[in-house]
Image (tube, rainbow, N blue to C red):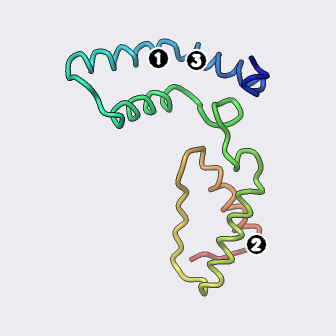
């Protein structure tokens, strides 16, 4: 089966462990949907996804090497540093305007923030 799905054994083991660890959560979510539909009738896809994702993200550490997926900054600091150097070059080409707001959006553990601060300090850049 592993050959057919082209999955690493570690991924399968981790996925099975995650499913087993979250079995009560999944059973509760299934019951929640069954009760909600029985009482109120059909639900929208948006309602289903909202509740499913809320339950998933609240179930534990889904990020990083022990989670279900990993983001580029967690694999190597090089990605975040290159993005920051690119942003700094754009900032300099724009005449170093002030103020500058750096906002990190997306899932993860704020890994980019650490890279940004490192690049700014390493290059002695003064942001006002």
Q: Residues within 10 Å of mark 1 (few under 14, many from 20)?
A: some
> Badge 2 is on which residue?
123
Sequence-wise first label, 2 or 3:
3
Mark 2–mark 3 Cα distance, whole angstroms, equals: 45 Å
Residue drawn at (70%, 58%) of the image: 80
The quarter of the picture where residue 13 lies is top right
Give the side of residue 92 with respect to residue 22, left or right: right
Q: Nearer the viewer, residue 58 or 32?
A: 32
Local SS, label 1: helix
The reply to whether dot 1 and dot 3 touch (C-beta < 8 Å) is: yes
Whether residue 20 is situated above or below residue 41 in the rendered picture? above
Q: Position of residue 126 (x, y in %)?
A: 65, 77
Q: Residues within 10 Å of mark 3 (few under 14, many from 20)?
A: few
Q: Nearer the viewer, residue 10 or 61?
A: 10
- How many marks the image carries: the answer is 3
Q: Residue furthest front?
A: 4
Sequence-wise first label, 2 or 1:
1
Q: Position of residue 66 (x, y in %)?
A: 69, 29
> Badge 3 is on which residue?
19
Whether residue 111 is situated above or below residue 82 in the rendered picture? above
Sequence-wise first label, 1 or 3:
3
> Badge 1 is on which residue?
26
For the N terminus, give its image quadrant.
Answer: top right
């Amino acid at each position: 089966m592993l050959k057919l799905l082209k999955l690493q054994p570690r991924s399968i083991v981790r996925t099975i462990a995650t499913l087993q660890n979250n079995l009560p959560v999944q059973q509760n979510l299934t019951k929640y949907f069954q009760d909600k539909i029985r009482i109120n009738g059909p639900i929208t896809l948006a309602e289903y996804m909202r509740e499913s994702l809320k339950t998933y993200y609240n179930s534990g550490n889904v990020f990083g090497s022990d989670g279900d997926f990993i983001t580029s900054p967690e694999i190597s600091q090089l990605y975040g540093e290159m993005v920051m150097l690119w942003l700094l070059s754009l900032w300099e080409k724009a005449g170093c305007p002030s103020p500058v707001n750096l906002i990190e959006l997306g899932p993860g553990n704020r890994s980019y923030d650490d890279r940004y601060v490192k690049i700014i300090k390493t290059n002695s850049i003064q942001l006002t």
